[in-house]
């Protein structure tokens, strides 16, 4: 039964696309990303298989993106039950190479964007008395990897913000979950000289998101770590 209305950012590939496919049998989906053709192909696949999905091609870093996303969700479905802040960027640089552009890009997409979109979506999330925010983080938020200083700081900021809004929104019935993957085999690794054989799969992370959302109202899934069996990599 397709009851939940779920918004997924960064939905054109990787964890976002895997999550869309995983939730398609139980949720109505608004899929958000920049790459219009890939979004449309995914939406067509879901709808052809009996699901309900709409695409919104938008750069989530644009000033008007939060308002456009919320308006589209209201237009297509009349509300929003779940916001999955999945869009993010992973780039590395050691301290000496972490120039202002590197810092600004990571903090903007990984921190400011989910904050702004969640704030904009709050009236819809609270309207039904039981909304949910899922923030996709990383094990880098709590583990030190050389070259990942700014990325780790951005994910640590996302997780601490999640903890704070979890407390703020309890009385309104909105739950806040953090999903923290280890190295996951997605296109973010394309062109990098690393072995992807021992990584998690995007579908593994999608399964953790699905698990969190399927819990009873008496349960708050605060943080789930999804790591490869060999470790965080």
Image (spheres, rainbow, N blue to C red):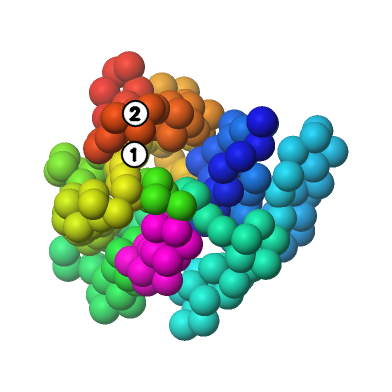
Q: Is residue 129 visible?
A: yes
The residue nearer to you, when weighing 6 against 154, is 6
Please give left or right for residue 179 compared with residue 45 in the image: left
Q: Could you tell which of marks 2 and 1 lies nearer the N-terminus?
A: 1
For residue 49, which quarter of the picture? top right
For residue 56, which quarter of the picture? bottom right
Secondary structure under tag 2 reads strand
Q: In the picture, which quadrant includes the C terminus?
A: top left
From the top left corner, tell me how far across and down residue 210 is, in percent: 48, 31
Please give left or right for residue 38 compared with residue 178 in the image: right
**Residue at the spot 76% in from the left edge and 55% down from the top edge:** 40
Residue labelled with disc 1 = 179
**Residue at the spot 51% in from the left edge and 81% down from the top edge:** 64
For label 2, the crowd category at 10 Å Cα-Cα, with few meaning under 14, some 14 to 19 and many 20 or more, is many
User: Measured along the vertical axis of the image, is residue 53 above or below residue 111?
Assistant: above
Extent of the magenta region:
114-127
Label 2, label 1: how far apart the Cα atoms are: 7 Å
The chief SS type of the magenta part is helix
Residue labelled with disc 2 = 226
Q: Is residue 122 magenta?
A: yes
Secondary structure under tag 1 reads strand
The residue nearer to you, when weighing 20 against 125, is 125
Q: Is residue 86 visible?
A: no
**Residue at the spot 26% in from the left edge and 78% down from the top edge:** 100
For label 1, the crowd category at 10 Å Cα-Cα, with few meaning under 14, some 14 to 19 and many 20 or more, is many
**Residue at the spot 63% in from the left edge and 48% down from the top edge:** 29
From the top left corner, tell me how far across and down residue 5 is, in percent: 58, 48
């Amino acid at each position: 039964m397709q009851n939940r209305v779920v918004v997924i950012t960064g939905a054109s590939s990787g964890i976002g696309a895997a999550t869309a496919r995983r939730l398609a049998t139980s949720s109505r989906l608004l899929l958000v990303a920049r790459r219009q053709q890939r979004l449309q192909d995914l939406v067509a696949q879901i709808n052809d298989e009996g699901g309900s999905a709409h695409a919104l091609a938008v750069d989530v870093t644009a000033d008007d993106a939060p308002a456009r996303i919320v308006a589209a969700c209201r237009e297509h479905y009349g509300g929003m039950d779940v916001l999955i802040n999945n869009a993010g960027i992973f780039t590395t640089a050691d301290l000496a190479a972490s120039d202002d552009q590197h810092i600004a890009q990571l903090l903007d997409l990984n921190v400011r964007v989910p904050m702004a979109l969640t704030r904009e979506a709050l009236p819809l999330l609270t309207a039904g008395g039981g909304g949910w925010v899922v923030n996709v983080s990383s094990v880098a938020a709590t583990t030190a990897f050389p070259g990942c200083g700014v990325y780790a700081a951005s994910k640590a900021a996302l997780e601490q913000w999640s903890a704070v809004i979890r407390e703020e929104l309890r009385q309104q019935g909105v739950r806040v979950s953090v999903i923290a993957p280890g190295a996951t085999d997605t296109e973010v690794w394309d062109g990098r000289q690393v072995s992807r054989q021992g990584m998690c799969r995007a579908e593994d992370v999608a399964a953790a998101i699905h698990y969190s959302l399927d819990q009873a109202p008496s349960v708050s899934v605060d943080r789930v770590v999804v790591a490869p069996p060999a470790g965080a990599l």
